Amino acid sequence: MSQDAASSRTVEHAAAALPRHAAPLTGTRFKALPALLLAVALLVLASLWTLAAEDELSLGRKPWQNLQRTVVEMSEPSFLRVWFGNPRLEARDADGRVLRVDDQRATERKYLAGVGRALWTTLRIATLGTVLAALLALPLGLLAARNLHAPRALSFGAKAVLNALRSIHTLVFGLLFVGIVGLGATAGILAVAAHSAGTLGKLLAEAIESLDMQPVDAVRATGATPAQVFFLGVWPAVLPQFVSQTLYVWEFNIRDSTILGLVGAGGLGLLLSEAMSLFQWGRLTTLLLAIVAMVTLFDTLSRAVRRRLV
Amino acid sequence: MSAVMGAVKDAVKDAVIEARSLQVSVGGHVLLRDVGISVAAGERVAVVGHNGAGKSSLLRALTGFNAVTGGSLRVLGAELSGLQTAPALRALRRRVAMVHQGLHLVGRLSALDNVLIGGAGRQASALTWLRRWPAEERRAAQAALSRVGLGWAAGRRTDSLSGGERQKVAIARALHQQPSLLLADEPTASLDAGAADEVSKLLVEVATERGATLVCVVHDLDLLPRLADRAIALRHGAVVADVVVTPHTPQQLRGLLK
């Protein structure tokens, strides 16, 4: 142990004796990159090899035809029928008798209104979930930040909880919470909150750990209590970062919430799974366009706000 | 209350700083060895020496940020060797103000908010967490800012001020703390000559007005005669000179520290 320390000190002295431009670090850095590339290449080859051996690497029987068909079927977004649909679409039986007359325009108008409501639900799930996540992340992030010196057991516990939350996907949490609180938006909100609390807590802890501690020590040097040191020295410095990160996670959550309905946790996903299981490709296109529009809108919005926060 | 007054009286009688064969080491590195210093109330002491000579370590030891690992150290009547309870340490820090070299203000807060932090030691109320201070604290902080010539900058964020202005805000914060001992760690290090002059002048004036003892780490030896009436030179963590400052002192110390 002491021998180790002694030898490392000699190494330090040797390094100090070298001129600065001949820092020995550059040598190791040059070796690190090829090693990394080699490791990645090996992993890629191993993955390809084993998957091929398990016969999992196939594109199906007629990938090209399938692609063409999907493209053709999806190339006619259903929402266009609101304007161009047949107002008197007649369904006849084999004898040519009219069974039913359908106003395509009215039907699609109703469907589009449903899409609007689902978008609104998705937005609400993402927003409430993110707010809840921020509230959960605050105490956990503070406990996990090493430089705030929380009691070791608490700090370790908080870090473990954050890692667990972060590593479980929102969709998995969705399944869990649907089982607990039933189908609907509540499950979605809780799922979003649970996963994002992990992300936000870790980001907060890292923001605090990378904080310049000199002003914080200066506050401590005035004889301030630990709470005062936190609120007067730490909090003003990390608040803008925390708000910015919360907005960023909110962006993510708007994207994530669009598929939560797939597991019955409310929002747009429900319509997605419905359209896919009924092979209504035109409606699927409508839904995907709606998602792209909403996500782009809120990404732009949140980015504009975040830029003004620094 | 009377206990505090008693402590203050004792401190005036005693030496403000009394170090006997003080040793400070951090992580196995000895930063200060066998330091013996006695500073009386009202003295103005400059601490000089090369980088790594232990100047900052000495200041950090005086406020309990570096633990005393050998010998004894008394500051304002408080024993710093041995274990310190957190409340005792806070009580001492309340009476010792510190002006650092740049970058020690909370950048996103206004100048006034930074100055108000100087009063944190005496105002422990939870309202201060939300930066809500009693009216008399706000008045005193505003007065301190005006004293250093920055009354106009009260509402300005400190990261929008110049280096010299920030250092004056730091002095105002120290002034607002109403300290018995004023410590400064190379307060002029990052300033140009004009600003350095102004800041040193302010430091001395503030210390004199408060009747506070001034201990200042000085890098630019030419500032010595203006700042201090006594100079302590450190080298490799030990005191190598402890002299009365005369106009010739910068020259002598330069020779000694070469």
Image (cartoon, rainbow, N blue to C red):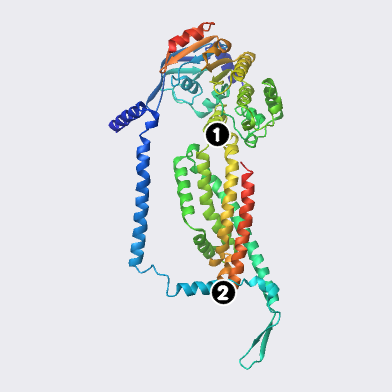
At label 2, the amino acid type is Glu
Residue B122 position within the rendered picture, expressed as x and y whole percent measured from the top left: 62, 27
Q: Residue at x 53, y 34 (%)?
A: A212
Say if residue B20 shows up in the picture.
Answer: no
Q: Is residue B205 above or below residue B136?
A: above
What is the count of numbered marks?
Answer: 2
Q: Which mark is residue A226?
A: 1
The residue that appears at 44% across and 43% down in the rendered structure is: A153
Find residue A255 and report its horizontal and vertical position in percent: 57, 59
The secondary element bearing badge 2 is classed as helix
Check disc 1: other Cα within 10 Å, few if <14, some if 14-19, many if 20+.
some
Q: Compared to B219, does A292 lie above or below? A: below
Q: Chain ID for label 2?
A: A
Observer-nearest of B227 and B96? B227
Per the image, the residue denoted by label 2 is A73
Q: Nearer the viewer, residue B250 or A250?
A: B250
Position of residue A134 in the picture relative to residue A48 (left or right): right
In this rendering, is residue A9 above or below A29?
A: above
Q: Position of residue A162 (x, y in %)?
A: 48, 49
Q: What's the residue type where badge 1 is placed?
A: Pro
The answer to whether the residue labelled 2 contacts the one labelled 1, judged by CB atoms less than 8 Å apart, is no
**Image position of A215 (left or right of B142):** left
